[in-house]
Amino acid sequence: MKSKPVILATCTIQTPRGVFAAHYSAAGLVRLDFPCGVGAARRLSSQRLDAISRSVRRWHKQAGRAVARILQGRLPGELPPLDLATGTPFQRKVWAALRQIPAGQTESYGRLAAALGAPKAARAVGSACGANPVPLLIPCHRVVPAGGGLGGFSVGLHWKRRLLAIEGA
DNA sequence: CATGAGATTGTAA
DNA sequence: TTACAATCTCATG
């Protein structure tokens, strides 16, 4: 039985680049939403921070600081715990590998696949990247096609370009 | 160098 | 079981 984690709180993160939304379960950060495009103000069921548990407040503080730092081209610092219960075993392996790519550096889908012991699963790795629920913190933007170009990005290619530029890659 | 077809893997419906 | 996806590689012109 695979069940989705229960979201306890949805909190916003204000940045010069827009408003992010972070969703938390009892285990940690479940998902990070990017600012949704053209001012289409999507309603967020955010709750008052003071009505939430102590741990969520701490996590949100860490998440907010990490996001802000990354957007400034600095290292994220300490991250909140991530609740990746939604992912399949393969996806979690991919996400774990993503977190080991240092800032300013890029990997190809194919090389990542090889690192996971499945040299021919490049395309599957791409799918797993697209399923990453916590972009930015899990740096899926550092993965590009072996043949050049940018590949794809779930939240919009302009973000991928922007993030890579910020990190100087 | 640009382009296209075929191979290949993991996932959701 | 089928169809799809943020790929790769190799054969051509």
Image: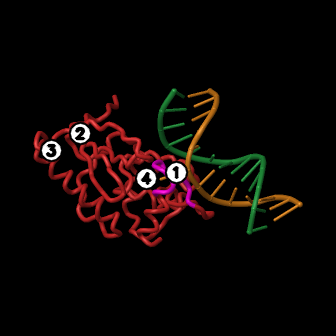
Chain colours: A red, B green, C orange
Measured as percent of width and height from the top left, residue A156 is found at 49, 51
Distance in Å between CA atoms under marks 2 and 1: 31 Å
Q: Residue at x 49, y 59 (%)?
A: A112
Q: In this view, does A72 lie above or below A110?
A: below
Residue A94, disc:
4
CA neighbours of label 2 inside 10 A, class few (<14), some (14 to 19), many (20+): some
- Which residues are drawn in magenta? A150-159
Please name the residue shown 32% across and 36% down the image. A43
Foreground mark, 2 or 1, reads: 2
Which sits earlier in the primary sequence, circle 1 or circle 4? 4
Question: What secondary structure is found at the residue carrying circle 1?
Answer: helix
Whether residue A40 appears in magenta in the rendering, the answer is no
Q: What residue type is labelled 1?
A: Gly
Q: Which of marks 3 and 1 is in front?
A: 3
Residue A26 % position (x, y):
19, 40
Q: Distance between the residues labelled 3 and 1?
A: 36 Å
Residue type (three-letter) at the residue carrying disc 4: Val
Q: Quadrant of the N terminus of chain A?
A: top left
Mark 3 lies on residue: A49
The mark nearer the N terminus, 2 or 1, is 2
Q: Name the residue under label 2.
A: A46
Amino acid, disc 2:
Ser
Alpha-carbon distance for marks 1 and 4?
A: 9 Å
- Labels 3 and 2 share a subunit: yes
Alpha carbon distance from label 3 to label 2: 9 Å
Give the vertical position of A19 relative to A47 (above or below).
Answer: below
